[in-house]
Amino acid sequence: MIPVERHQQILALVAERGVMSIAELTERLAVSHMTIRRDVQKLEEQGAVISVSGGVRTAERLASEPSHLAKTTMFSSEKMAIGQCAARHIPRGSCIYLDAGTTTLALARELLKRDDLLIVTNDFVIARLLMEGSDCQLIHIGGSVCRENRSSVGEAAARMLRTLAIDIAFISASCWGPRGLYTPDEHKVPVKQAACDVSNKRILLSDSSKYNKIATWLALPLTRFDQLITDTALSKAGREVLQQGEWELILADQ
């Protein structure tokens, strides 16, 4: 049986059962554990399945994103830890981009006492926070307004970003996994891509509750990032997969 046929059978079995162990797949497909593990790793890279301890399950799909207000109450301590960790990676005099999101908002709060940065953002909440509480220079990129996310999105916002030269981009994610970061909103995609294109260093900020989930649009492959900053609740399986990449995985302790 060729790999493509095995992959199709694995997907069919997992879709039928929801979760299957490596041992069960090995027996059903009459191949070695190593072969199944390679197949599962390939399918996970494609965002089709998710590894769990001793097995594999179907990927959880995010159909829509919670409102900004709802997100501010979710995993707040993890986001605070990630923000504190990320702030330590910003040299003096840097030009940074803060992508829209409540995790990047946590980072923005850590920067209120600084006066040496040029901060670019598409997030209206972040812009207001920094405008009222910080002495840093500030640029909001404009563009079409997304009310639910309190941010600007779309091609106009992306075009503005492409006129800038940014030292570090801190990118948020609706959900993410070994293949990359996803969003259910296609209008966010060009903004995230443009921010990465014009930045010397790219850092993903996202709490571990969003890991191993997918949405309709693959915004960026994980290979675009130099660092991934998440929290210590990331699963052992997730750590093992992510530590194999060329990026640096950082776990922020609360």
Image: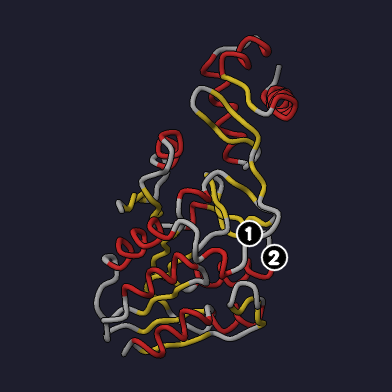
Residue 160 x/y as whole percent: 56, 84
Q: Which residue is mark 2?
A: 186
Q: Nearer the viewer, residue 222 or 207?
A: 207
Q: Nearer the viewer, residue 244 or 139?
A: 139
Q: Residues within 10 Å of mark 1 (few under 14, many from 20)?
A: many
Number of numbered discs visible in the structure rendering:
2
Give the residue displayed 30% in from the left and 68% down from the top.
Answer: 87
Give the residue displayed 75% in from the left and 26% down from the top.
Answer: 16
Residue 131 x/y as whole percent: 41, 89
Identity of the amino acid at label 2? Glu
Identity of the amino acid at label 1? Thr
Q: Secondary structure at mark 1?
A: strand
Image height check: is 248 above or below 2? below
Are the residues tagged 1 and 2 within 8 Å (C-beta)?
yes
Q: Which residue is mark 1?
A: 183
Give the residue displayed 58% in from the left and 86% down from the top.
Answer: 142
Q: Secondary structure at mark 2?
A: helix
Q: Residues within 10 Å of mark 2 (few under 14, many from 20)?
A: some
**What's the distance in space between the residues labelled 1 and 2, CA to CA?**
7 Å
Residue 183 x/y as whole percent: 63, 59
Image height check: is 127 above or below 54? below
Image height check: is 43 above or below 232? above
- Location of residue 28 by image quarter: top right
